[in-house]
Image (cartoon, rainbow, N blue to C red):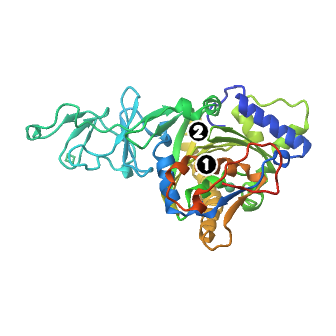
Amino acid sequence: MPAVDDTALSLPAVTAALLERLRVQLASGQPDWKDSGAPEAHIPVERYFSPEVWQAELQGLFRPLPLIAAHSSELAPGQVLAHDGFGVPLLLSRDTDGRVRCFLNVCRHRGMRLVQAADGAQPRNSVVCPYHGWTYRLDGQLRHMLHAESFDSCPKGARDLVPVPCAERHGLLWVVPDAGGSIDLEAFLGGLNAELPFFGIEQLRHFRTVEAEYPANWKLIIDAFLESYHIRVLHQDTIYPFFSDGFTSAARFGPHIHSLVARRAAQEWAADPGSEPPATIEGLSRLATTSQVIFPNTVTIFHPDYLSLITVYPTGAESLRWTHRILIPASKATPDWTPHWEKTFRLIEQGVFQKEDIHCAIGIQRGLKTGANRHVTAGRIEQGLAWFHDQVRQRTEPHLQNVGATVNAQASTPTTSTPKPESGVPL
Ligand code: FES
Ligand SMILES: [Fe+2]
């Protein structure tokens, strides 16, 4: 695996427990979902196309929560990077001491956009507005304005760039795209903070990003990465040969979901009572593919030798922006490896994600309003969907006060451990 080449660590506690759960499941042939007691869940179809739900999600999720804007390697010291992915024009900067800041990408004179996103990360000593030349330092301070004597109502500091909460952690740049918001990643990530370092995201290098818009609700993409039930059929000719059918173990850290999906190689390992748990990420990746949904809109997939970092954003109730970054080991970020990564990227982005997972999200969206289904059903084998939609519901409900009963009247996932397979859970 990419991150920690040749470095032996012990598995973090929850990941180790999940791997042990996989071993037990594989050795017994009895997947966890069979006796988990979790009922199937029913998600009202309106959740996937209602403009009111979309607006409530913007207010309850996409403005107040920390979102992942980029990998650390995308912004070098002395660079700036415009980011438009979250519906708010943002400008990230890293000063020569390495500190990352984020601002609204809006000039304090007459509001011109300062840096174009299409330009990518650029080395800058300062940011100069293309309209009248107001000039800002990378810490956001207004440094220079032409004909400054023309602006008498401008005390020092009053026209600095507007800061947006941001932080760098686990090799990722996080922002809260609301100038009035605040960020506390320690609290937000909770127990995930202890798991993530093992996966070494910080040591990876950005290779490529693909951005695209698709006519589907953003949650359909997250749904696709919350269950391994579909791998056997949808990915039959692509990735299924590497996986065991239906053996997954998952844990929740607050709203975040951390899961391991058993690979075929784990079968032999689990059958041998003397086999040790792996001590490295390379060893873990031979046995299981780790994936996380970092709430609300990021998916990590730790492939055997690289990381897919996927972010989705709702550009409308029925449209999303897909951003897929491939992050590779630093030791393989050299020109001679480029053809290998180009091919890898094509296979996973175009072959698996676009033709298979995204294709299904778009296919589902087209049928949601037909009346064929009042709910989307998630079986007990797809419990991650129930967890995720329950979190979304809880956080959007306060913003849905004026919406009709179908969308708004929901029940939470019961905490009982009594199996109730006959009764679905409306979410
Ligand atoms: S709008 Fe930026 S200097 Fe005028
Ligand atoms: Fe998939």
Residue 212 visible, this orientation: no
In the picture, measured across the screen, residue 161 lies left or right of residue 240, that is left
* C-alpha separation, residue under disc 1 versus residue under disc 2: 10 Å
For residue 159, the mark is none
Instruction: Name which residue type carries label 2.
Output: Lys
Residue extending furthest left?
149
Determine contact: label 1, label 2, CB under 8 Å. yes
Q: Residues within 10 Å of mark 2 (few under 14, many from 20)?
A: some
Asked if the beta carbon under badge 1 is closer than 8 A to the nearest atom of ligand 2, the reply is no
Indicate the secondary structure of the residue bearing disc 1. helix
Q: Is residue 382 above or below residue 162?
A: below
**Residue carrying label 1:** 340
Where in the figure is residue 248, as x and y percent of width and height? Answer: 77, 45
Where in the figure is residue 397, as x and y percent of width and height? Answer: 55, 51
Q: Is residue 204 above or below residue 45?
A: above
**Residue carrying label 2:** 332
Indicate the secondary structure of the residue bearing disc 2. helix
Where in the figure is residue 312, as x and y percent of width and height? Answer: 53, 52
Residue 20 visible, this orientation: yes
Where in the figure is residue 403, as x and y percent of width and height? Answer: 52, 60
